[in-house]
Amino acid sequence: MRVEKAKGTVTVYLEGELDHFSAQQIRRIMDHAIEESSIKSMILDMENMTFMDSSGIGVILGRYKQLRQRGGKMMVRKMNRQVEKVFRLSGMDQLIDII
């Protein structure tokens, strides 16, 4: 996983699986990126993410709420079909923009 910051936006490049086993580590990295700077938006690049389960949904929704409390927003991009299906079935597409 890679994190890039530029002009009030942080982009998180997710890779592999976002599941029960990886959720805690990914949560810590994303929280650190949010807390470390005064970012207003986060982009999750999911091009290299192969799987997401309910633990992944929880991680994303938690960070979405943190950003929203600061007046910021979250966006996602480059999801494969399986990840996008989980994303939409969970209703996250109603909260988070797909760009």
Image (cartoon, rainbow, N blue to C red):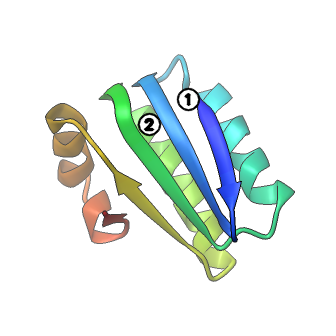
Which of the numbered marks, if any, corresponds to residue 23? 1
The residue at the point 71 percent across, 37 percent down is 29
The residue at the point 37 percent across, 29 percent down is 49
Q: Residue 59, image x and y in percent?
A: 53, 43
Q: Residue 75, image x and y in percent?
A: 42, 62
**Crowding near pointer 2: few (<14 within 10 Å), some, many (20+)?**
many
Residue at the right extreme, as displayed: 36
As helix, strand or loop, the secondary structure at mark 2 comes to helix
**Crowding near pointer 1: few (<14 within 10 Å), some, many (20+)?**
many
User: In the drawing, does residue 19 fall left or right of residue 95?
Assistant: right
Q: Is residue 93 above or below residue 32?
A: below
Quadrant of residue 51 within the rendered picture? top left
The kind of residue on which mark 1 rests is Ala
Q: Residue 30, image x and y in percent?
A: 66, 45
Q: Is residue 86 above or below residue 94?
A: above
Q: Quadrant of the N terminus?
A: top right
Residue at the bottom extreme, as displayed: 71
Which of the numbered marks, if any, corresponds to residue 54? none
User: In the drawing, does residue 51 fall left or right of residue 18?
Assistant: left
**Tag 1 and tag 2, C-beta contact below 8 Å:** yes
As helix, strand or loop, the secondary structure at mark 1 comes to helix
Earlier residue among tags 1 and 2: 1
Q: Quadrant of the C terminus?
A: bottom left
The kind of residue on which mark 2 rests is Gly
The CA span between labels 1 and 2 is 6 Å
Give the tally of numbered discs.
2
Residue underneath mark 2: 56
User: In the drawing, does residue 35 fall left or right of residue 24?
Assistant: right
